[in-house]
Amino acid sequence: QVQLVESGGGSVQSGGSLRLSCAASANTSLGVCMAWFRQAPGKEREGVAVIGSGTLTRYEDSVKGRFTISRDDAKKTLYLQMDSLKPDDTAMYYCAAYWFLCGDRGSFAPGAYEYWGQGTQVTVSS
């Protein structure tokens, strides 16, 4: 059973930055599709960013130009650098993965992902 453990959440003011990390318990270097999702109270879980094992990255429109997804497979760790944070970014953030190629674009469908972390809270105040 693969475990994913997020860290790096917290409370910041609007315009601030946070860097989320997600440590995996298994090798991520061979065709593993990884993503960040978020869920605000009363809202559905939504995809934020996806990254494949090659050059594939994909971002939800509202975070383009502000968030950067990256991975270090030697450390089995996924990252999400979040800059210019807004109150609307407030949510529980989850990392997710499945051990297969992402495909052409990478999926934002939660059901596509087999493994999930427990989440880390991000709160942005105005």
Image (cartoon, rainbow, N blue to C red):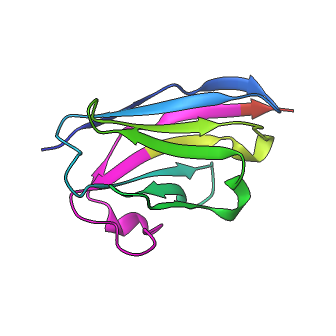
Q: Position of residue 68 (x, y in %)?
A: 59, 44
Q: Residue 52 occupies which quadrant of the picture?
A: bottom left
Membership of 66 in magenta stretch: no
Q: Which residues are magenta?
A: 95-123
Q: How many marks?
A: 0
Instruction: Please give left or right for residue 54 compared with residue 100 in the image.
Output: right
Instruction: Please give left or right for residue 45 compared with residue 118 in the image.
Output: right
Considering only vertical position in the picture, is 20 above or below 108? above
Location of the N terminus by quadrant is top left
Farthest residue, direction bottom: 104
Q: Position of residue 2 (x, y in %)?
A: 18, 43
Farthest residue, direction right: 126
Q: Residue 113 occupies which quadrant of the picture?
A: bottom left
Viewer-proximal residue among 17 and 11? 17
Q: Residue at x 72, y 58 (%)?
A: 62
Considering only vertical position in the picture, is 81 above or below 12? below
Q: Residue at x 31, y 53 (%)?
A: 97
Q: Residue at x 19, y 52 (%)?
A: 30
